[in-house]
Image (cartoon, rainbow, N blue to C red):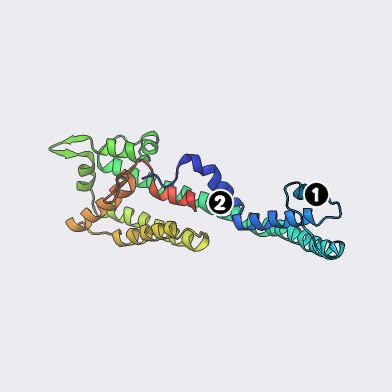
Amino acid sequence: MQLISNSFKPARKVLRIIDPRLAALFFIALFAMAITASDPLAREALCDFKICLRAYRPDYWNAIFNTMASGAVISLFFYWVLVELPQYRKRERLKRIFASQYRSFKLQCIDIFLVLSNSTNDSETAVRLLEPDEFRKYFKQDAGDHQILWDRFLNGLNDYYLEALARKMEHLRDEFRFFLLAVESEDEKLIELLKRFTETTHYNVTRSEDYDEVKSLSGYFWNIFAGWSFIDGYRSDDIVLEAIERI
């Protein structure tokens, strides 16, 4: 499931930079400033469309509303420059940092997957396997003895590698929590998705070689790296990165 169409990404980016409500107020104030200006050009243009504004003592009221509208335009502009724009830049910086850390987590885990499955372990292969489609294709390869490469990885898990994976998962969980506290978003569905992922990561941390524990861990990793979901089936995108991008 793709969370957002590529054709809407530029529009969504603009909406993140400019709050639609502030933009609406800004243009309303700008319009009010134009029609209450001492020059009657804007009022005459409205009259051409049969929208003629009349008032008792118009010069008096125009001066008052023009001053108010001008103040609103200036205030909204500086609010955007001093508050909205810095918040947007902070949010984008946090997103870049967290996306990079998430990618690093995946690469480090893939290195372990490749080692334990006795596969080629090089940086190019690891980067290629960041894509869910490539990951599924690679680890579903036949490894002999009625196994696939993913089975070989699971069978190779021992205390040392379980500890290494547990530490990486705990670090990712903590980073998720920090990210959710630091970044602001009005999209409750996205925040809920990332919270569920944080809880799932916490739940699946294990240092035990017990069959059920390893099976649960396998499902967790297969969901992240292969893009599997019981609801949507296999995805071609990374749902976590998509959620980060949309915040």
Q: Secondary structure at mark 1?
A: helix
Image height check: is 184 above or below 114? Answer: below
Side of 189 where 152 appears, left or right: left
Which residue is painted at 60% across and 51% down in the image? 17
- The answer to which quarter of the image holds residue 20 is bottom right
Image height check: is 126 above or below 50? Answer: above
- The answer to which quarter of the image holds residue 32 is bottom right
Q: Position of residue 64 (x, y in %)?
A: 82, 65
**Label 2 environment density (alpha carbons within 10 Å; few <14, some 14–19, many ≥20):** some
Q: For mark 1, what is the residue?
A: 44
Viewer can see residue 171: no
Lower position in the chain sequence, tag 1 or tag 2: 1
Looking at the picture, tell me which residue is in the foreground, 221 or 56. Answer: 56
Side of 15 where 30 appears, left or right: right
Q: What is the total number of numbered labels drawn onto the structure image? A: 2
Q: Position of residue 203 (x, y in %)?
A: 30, 62
Which quadrant is home to the N terminus?
top left
The mark lying in front, picked from 1 and 2, is: 1
Residue type for callout 2: Glu
Viewer can see residue 144: yes
Q: Position of residue 36 (x, y in %)?
A: 80, 57
Which residue is painted at 57% across and 50% down in the image? 15
Q: For mark 2, what is the residue?
A: 92
Residue type for callout 1: Glu
Which residue is painted at 69% across and 58% down in the image? 82
Looking at the picture, tell me which residue is in the foreground, 90 or 115. Answer: 90
Q: Position of residue 221 (x, y in %)?
A: 30, 50
Please tell me the numbered disc located at residue 223: none
Q: Secondary structure at mark 2?
A: helix
Which residue is painted at 51% across and 43% down in the image? 9
